[in-house]
Image: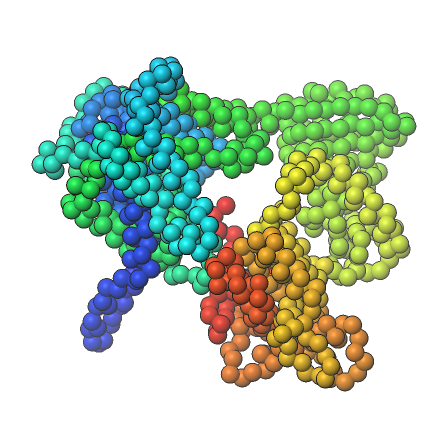
Amino acid sequence: MSACVPTRATDPTRTERTQSPSTPPTRPRRFRLAGADVSASIAVFLIALPLSLGIALATGAPLQAGLVAAAVGGLVVGRLGGSPLQVSGPAAGLTVVTADLIQRYGWRTTCAITVLAGLAQLGLGCLRVARTALAVSPAIVHGMLAGIGVTIAVAQLHIVLGGTPQSSVPDNLRALPAQLADLHPAALSVSALTLALLLLWPRLPGRAGRLLRKIPAALVAVAGATAAASLAGFRLPKVDLPSWSSHALAGLPEGPVLGVVAAVLTTTLVCSVQSLLGAVAADKLVAGRPGPPAPVGRSDLDRELLGQGAANIVSGGLGGLPVAGVAVRTSANVHAGAVSRNSTMLHGVLVVVATLLMVPLLELIPLASLAALVMAVGIQMVSLHHIRTVTRHREVLVYAVTTAGVVFFGVLEGVALGIAVAVAVSLHRLARTRITHDEQDGVHHVHVRGQLTFLAVPRLSRALHLVPHGAPAVVELDGSFMDHAAYETLQDWQNTHTARGGSVELTGRRAGLKISEPGVPTTVHNEPGSAEAAASAGCRCRPWTPWRNHQCEQPHLGPASGARQDGPGDGDGAGGGTPGPDRGRSGHELARGISAFQRHTAPLVRGELARLAREGQRPSQLFLTCADSRLVTSMITSSGPGDLFVVRNVGNLVPPPADAARDTRPGEEWGDDSVAAAIEYAVEVLKVRSITVCGHSGCGAMQALLAAEPEGAATPLKRWLRHGRPSLERMADAGRPWPRLAGRAPADAVEQLSLTNVVQQLEHLRAHESVARALREGAVELHGMYFHVGEAQAYLLTGADEGQVFDHVRAEEVPV
């Protein structure tokens, strides 16, 4: 029986020791606070202080409630939560929900609802259902946040202009013309200065700008606007922090039961989804942070839900706002170099200290400045990147409906509308099937576009019966799903048609289905580009690209069947194909592959490629790997057009620059400008953020290095492979430990040299001036990678320069 408590094993910042009765007791380890955590906590505190006051102002709650939530989020979630570096507190995503609760039920009941939402989160955490929240469509989540952002921005605009916001977006929009006619110049000036500082501070140029940008823009904006208002003598409404003795705490919930239950569910939903998505995002930020990996464990989502629930119980009980993970503060915490949950907790301590000691300074802040700050946060919640993403995935309708629902009806209603539209869109896609029939040169073509389900069977049957008996027919199945009813309809018609002297040719994405039994005179047109084409002839392979470099096993077809599946370049790849009469058809296979690309792939990628053609290439990574035909970089990195700047050569070698030459023969030049030019272009012009050197198993270049003879003719291959000699020397150095592969020693000398070569080429990279400069500035990071072809397993290099380990990258380790 398991208890509903977070386990210490999930906290990487703590270590437990087990002792046997005979072992003498050891002293407990002293608490240590890393310097990186201290600096990160200060950076987060400077952001959290003005934002907490601004969010409290936007909700209509007492301003102290924002400080209470910030302190509780830092201390309670920081200690109990499952995401070590996520920072929690009052979140902009909860502003609309909280403001509506305060208006309906009053502040004390809102605090009680926050406590009940925390209890609900504890229950969900005990049931371990945290990951189910991630099943919500991203279009719905982004639409919810965008709707909340619009609501916040429209409401705070009235305060920026010197007025008072209304209770809803329609009311605020109707009141806006009158507000524009009655501007308050002082409030507008302070707000404009706040927005200008927010916009310009992160863009300060030069070395001085890099130093100044370390001060959070939110703090600079509010402090600058406050100082300007004080010097100008503006008489504006300012922060008013009443005495803590009069601070309102939670009371018993008052109001209709169904209304309170709905409020609890809404608060629970928004708090939980935002916190869990924030924890996943925090893991990605930590993984992408430059420099050596910090000992930070991955988020435990169920524990994070428990921590958030505990924080909401405490915050609501103490009269604070609802608590959730906050993206802005989390990002600042990670980028500031935090290495443990101590930074989050220390930021909470600093909020408490500021609340007790900095009240006179806080009361100088104009409310117009805080309103401008929160309005900017609301505008940023409508992300253009998210809009482009949902548009690319054809979910813009779900996004738009969710956003409009949140703006005009409320958060819970908007999310419900988004879910309903998402379900309707999915059903429409499943049911929408276009079936056409035409005749070309005596051949009847039946084209099926979309999912082939029982709903499309009547139209499929009508189209198939338009094909005359005995006529040649081509059925193109362009979809990714076929149910049993459609399968039987197509199979029955096919058997009947072929029995009456006709021929059936199946093409397209579904051609790989075993429509007919062995022996039925069916021609399967195995086009390059149909991933299942080989399976139609009994092939057990599932190719992933248009080219197929393998011999398929065909248990029921003899050599004379003519069903060979080879593609261009057969016989030299991993499949070990043998030369045959089809080899002369490589030009024909190339043309067929291009034709299949134009039919199937080009319509899907044309929009994205057109955008890249307009904007130019902006790759995030330079990927340097071997020219081996078995390494498909886009496949093993799940990348697409414009993502990788790829440099391939024999042996994934990076010649050191010419000024770092270590010539071993008189007159022999060491540097190689071709690779160096690509490196310089990628770093200096394309501004890539990372460089990866990828080796692989069974590398022919490494085999040639091991078998190379010192004497003999200097062929082009030998001259190139001289850049691999430092790898040989490194492997032969007894003072250096061998790189290990997921905890084991290399299987043979080739694998040992391949791993050593990756490490050595990373050293060569650091010798290039452009890379060295980018590393000093923290603008780029280096990665080592090893791909085991036979196992289809990728490994990433970890550890220091000595004792390197290539660790597994498993599918479940990285959230999608």
Which of the pair 568/56 is nearer the observer? 56
Say whether residue 198 is left or right of residue 635. Answer: left
Question: What is the tally of numbered marks visible in this picture?
Answer: 0
Which of the pair 492/595 is nearer the observer? 595
Residue depicted at 66% across the width and 29% down the height = 450
Which of the pair 745/325 is nearer the observer? 325
Quick check: can you spot residue 301? no
Q: Looking at this rendering, what residue extends furthest in the left direction? A: 245
Residue depicted at 29% across the width and 52% down the height = 42
Say whether residue 178 is left or right of residue 563. Answer: left
Say whether residue 220 is left or right of residue 643. Answer: left
* Colour option used: rainbow
In the image, residue 46 above or below residue 394: below
Question: x and y percent of residue 95 in the render?
Answer: 32, 31
Question: x and y percent of residue 346 in the render?
Answer: 25, 53
Residue depicted at 38% across the width and 57% down the height = 337
Quick check: can you spot residue 701? yes
Q: Tell me the quarter of the picture where residue 393 sits.
A: top right
In the image, residue 125 above or below residue 400: below
Residue depicted at 86% across the width and 57% down the height = 580
Question: x and y percent of residue 649 in the render?
Answer: 70, 64
Question: x and y percent of residue 144 in the render?
Answer: 42, 30
Which of the pair 464/322 is nearer the observer? 322
